[in-house]
Image (tube, helix red, strand yellow):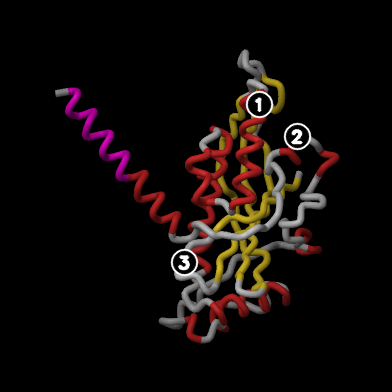
């Protein structure tokens, strides 16, 4: 009898996992291309002398936008189909001019783009990717990252395993997730999301001793993740193509 209930529990949790993955794939997916190397998203938190992405080619600069509050795109509840014009989804007073222009460009080429759905999926991706990265789960990471980003993450995971180290990255919560940059480059649309979260990051050696971080300290983390999608592709999914972390 107990075995029967355990079997039902396994099926139930498997269904939940499948639902989350399917919903996530609606926002993030596979994309071919070569965006260049991307740095370890946790490296900057361990070395205060290396804040930002440095010379990484595929990290999109955000300019002075980091010094002012960032707001996500809001839907106008007064219209049934705000994407008919795009203007109803953009609050000029709430966002700076480059972001407004970029979002208008996105809406002009991608009428199916929904900022609310995008942010919802990006939050799921943020949690899933951090968890897979810290756990060394390359199978989960591969369909969510661009080829070059995946190659870089995989290398860091291999280096960590060879050193006998394990990373414990606990996402306490996402405080905010806002679109801070959007633009179309050629046939590719790009969106950068600013994540502000609370995390516990700890690195242990092969004996389980802490070599970096504090298992009892919650740290504030600010991350900028850029997602892209080929406009001409029939695949509606987006791919993580760049990461940047600030202290």
Vertical side of 49 occupied by 25: above or below: below
Can residue 99 be seen in the rendering of this structure? yes
Identify which residue is drawn at 62% across, 46% down. 197
Viewer-proximal residue among 96 and 4: 4
Span of residues in magenta: 2-15
Of the numbered discs 2 and 1, the one sitting upstream in the chain is 2
| Residue occupied by mark 2 | 46
Disc number for residue 203: 1
Vertical side of 245 occupied by 62: above or below: below
Residue 104: image location, x then y, percent: 61, 79
Of the numbered discs 1 and 3, the one sitting upstream in the chain is 1
Query: To which quarter of the image does residue 25 belong?
Result: bottom left
Q: Are marks 1 and 3 in contact (CB under 8 Å)?
A: no
Quadrant showing the C terminus: top right
| Residue occupied by mark 3 | 236
Of the numbered discs 3 and 2, the one sitting upstream in the chain is 2
User: What is the crowding at mark 2: few (fewer than 14 residues within 10 Å), some, or many (at least 20)?
Assistant: few
Q: For the residues marked 2 and 1, what is the alpha-carbon distance in whole angstroms?
A: 10 Å
């Amino acid at each position: 009898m107990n075995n029967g209930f355990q079997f039902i529990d396994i099926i139930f949790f498997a269904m939940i996992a499948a639902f989350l993955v399917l919903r996530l794939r609606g926002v993030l997916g596979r994309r071919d291309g070569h965006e260049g190397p991307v740095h370890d998203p946790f490296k900057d938190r361990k070395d205060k002398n290396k804040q930002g992405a440095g010379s990484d080619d595929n990290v999109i600069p955000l300019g002075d936008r980091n010094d002012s509050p960032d707001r996500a795109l809001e839907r106008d509840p007064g219209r049934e189909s705000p994407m008919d014009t795009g203007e109803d989804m953009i609050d000029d007073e709430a966002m700076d001019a480059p972001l407004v222009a970029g979002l208008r460009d996105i809406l002009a080429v991608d009428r199916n783009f929904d900022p609310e759905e995008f942010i919802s999926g990006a939050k799921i991706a943020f949690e899933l990717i951090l968890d897979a990265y810290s756990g060394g789960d390359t199978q989960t990471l591969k369909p969510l990252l661009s080829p070059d980003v995946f190659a870089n993450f995989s290398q860091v995971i291999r280096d960590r395993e060879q050193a006998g180290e394990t990373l414990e990255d606990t996402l306490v919560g996402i405080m905010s997730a806002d679109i801070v940059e959007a633009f179309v480059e050629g046939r590719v649309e790009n969106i950068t999301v600013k994540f502000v979260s609370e995390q516990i990051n700890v690195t242990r050696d092969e004996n389980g001793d802490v070599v970096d971080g504090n298992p009892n300290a919650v740290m504030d983390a600010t991350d900028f993740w850029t997602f892209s999608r080929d406009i001409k592709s029939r695949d509606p999914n987006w791919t993580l193509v760049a990461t940047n972390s600030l202290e």
